Amino acid sequence: MSTAKKPVIFCDFDGTITNSDNIVAIMKHFQPAGCEAIMHDIVNGHTSIREGVGAMFALMPSAQKDVIISYVLGQAGIREGFARFLDYVREQDIEFFVTSGGIDFFIDPLLEPFDIPQDHVYCNGANFSGNHIEITWPHTCQEPCTNDCGMCKTTVIRQYPAEQYERILIGDSLTDFEGAKIADLVYSRSHLTLKCQELGVPHVPFETFDEIIKDLKQKQEQGVL
Ligand SMILES: [Mg+2]
Ligand SMILES: [Zn+2]
């Protein structure tokens, strides 16, 4: 690395490491009564992500735990090039974090083959001990974020000051946008690409992790990273 700043990567999980969003898949498949209205409220910004996701899972009985987990693991696919990308960042000694608004009960098993240290995975938890599923939030917003994110990506990113780190964000959705605004380099797909275009935030669109490897290599060769 030619820059004095140390690169650090913050990578979204749902729709980024996996091909599609697992919470959406769970809700579409099990359709707990009332979840559609909550989904609308989240999309319209009438309810926060934390409140909305918590409320949707609270509609589902804890007894469904095993069927939910086997459903989500059965349908989730890992995006092309992810294993090669991890090899690359390890070889380059680039620090890599998963920053996800998803839940540990599907993230941990899906990431299991990739040997990512547990303290490099930021996500939400779930408690199945009550009648209904309770989502737990170990990484909530800290100042100055007041979005009630649930898992607050900008709070995690801010632990790595811009003066010392080249902060690289990889993501796909609107929930990645606040992070994208403070990152030095953004790899985007889907809604995040549109939002970055709309508001003029610099970004590099991608579909596979191989494309990100290629772009990072180019930037290293050009001496901009
Ligand atoms: Mg996502
Ligand atoms: Zn937040």
Image (spheres, grey):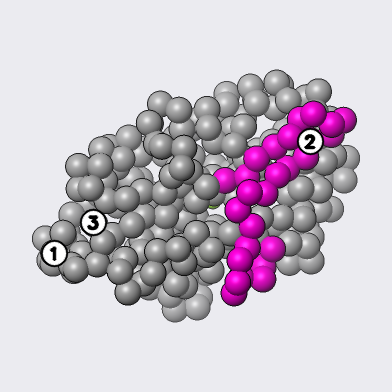
Measured as percent of width and height from the top left, residue 214 is found at 22, 51
Task: Say which label, 3 or 1, has the lower sequence index.
Answer: 1
Measured as percent of width and height from the top left, residue 71 is found at 65, 25
Measured as percent of width and height from the top left, residue 150 is found at 66, 55
Q: Residues within 10 Å of mark 3 (few under 14, many from 20)?
A: some
**How far apart, in angstroms, are the residues tagged by discs 3 and 1?**
12 Å
Look at the numbered disc 2 and give the secondary structure of its residue.
loop
Q: Residues within 10 Å of mark 1 (few under 14, many from 20)?
A: few
- Can residue 44 be seen? no
> Is label 1 within 8 A of ligand 1 (CB to nearest ligand atom)?
no
Residue 131 forms part of the magenta stretch: yes
Query: Residue tagged by mark 2?
Result: 133
Return the mark for residue 180.
Answer: none
Residue 218 forms part of the magenta stretch: no
Which residue shows up at 43% across the image and 44% down it? 120
Task: Say which label, 1 or 2, has the lower sequence index.
Answer: 1
> Is label 3 within 8 A of ligand 1 (CB to nearest ligand atom)?
no
* Amino acid on which disc 3 is placed: Leu
* Amino acid on which disc 1 is placed: Ser
Dominant secondary structure of the magenta stretch? loop
Stretch in magenta: 123-148
Asked if 105 appears above or below 36 in the picture, the reply is above
Query: Residue tagged by mark 1?
Result: 2
Asked if 171 appears above or below 162 in the picture, the reply is above
Task: Say which label, 3 or 2, has the lower sequence index.
Answer: 2
Furthest-bottom residue in view? 200
Mark 3 vs mark 2, foreground winner is 2
> Is label 2 within 8 A of ligand 1 (CB to nearest ligand atom)?
no
Q: In the rendered view of the protein, which quadrant contains the N terminus?
A: bottom left
Query: Residue tagged by mark 3?
Result: 216
Horizontal arrangement in the rendering, residue 31 relative to residue 147 (left or right) = right
Which residue shows up at 29% across the image and 42% down it? 85
